Image (spheres, rainbow, N blue to C red):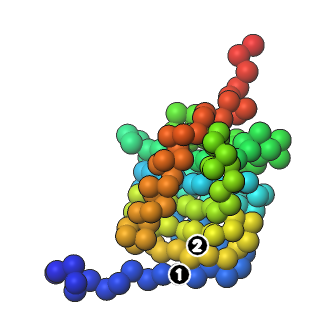
Amino acid sequence: MKPSDRPAPETLVVDGGETLAAMRLQLLRGARRRVAIYQPALPTDAYNHAAELDELRRIATAGRGAEIRLILHDPAAALRDSHRLIALAQRLPSTVLVREPVEESDRTYGSAYLLTDAGGYLFLPEAPRPRGRGAMEDRASQAPLQQHFQEAWERAARATALQPLDL
């Protein structure tokens, strides 16, 4: 089959909280070993439900090459809020990696997204609003987000607020 014979990837529209949660779960279920999450703030209704956490745990423990990368603007706030994704990151610090942007251009970035190794993505132009788009597999649309994430990841610092205290 030639590339031109393949059907175009289906873009899914996110238009509310229920659609957003369902799409997040669907993407996590399609991921194999790697996920990247850019989330300026970590609201209590994101990545906090049992099914989502089960999928994140499955990805994080998938064996060699397993990795969940998470960029948060204020990881200490998520820790204070006792977010369950942060608890997972603390239990699996070698595969659930959290970084915090240090450059002003990164700290003012207001969008949120989820990227999977299966080529899936979910993009919210305004992170607090449950409105955006995504696809289960669309590497061409995912590519600019993947590039943004990689660049922001390289400039970010490890989230030391989440590290356990050595007493």
- Which residue is label 1 attached to? 12
The type of residue carrying mark 2 is: Met
The answer, for residue 60, to whether it is visible in the render is: no
The answer, for residue 158, to whether it is visible in the render is: yes
Quadrant that contains the N terminus: bottom left
> Quadrant location of residue 31?
bottom left
The type of residue carrying mark 1 is: Leu
For label 2, the SS is: helix
Q: Nearer the viewer, residue 30 or 5?
A: 5
Q: Are marks 1 and 2 in contact (CB under 8 Å)?
A: yes
Left-right relation of 150 to 1: right
Which of pointers 1 and 2 indicates the residue nearer the eye?
A: 1
For label 1, the SS is: strand
Left-right relation of 32 to 4: right
View extreme (front): residue: 105
Residue pictured at 63% horizontal, 50% vertical: 105
- Which residue is label 2 attached to? 23
Mark toward the start of the polypeptide (1 vs 2): 1
> Quadrant location of residue 3?
bottom left
Q: Give the total number of marks visible in the rendering.
A: 2
**Is residue 130 shown above or below 69?**
below
* Relative image position of residue 135 (x, y in whole percent): 48, 75
Q: Residues within 10 Å of mark 2 (few under 14, many from 20)?
A: many
Q: Residues within 10 Å of mark 1 (few under 14, many from 20)?
A: some
View extreme (top): residue: 167
Q: Nearer the viewer, residue 96 or 149?
A: 149
**Is residue 81 shown above or below 46?**
above
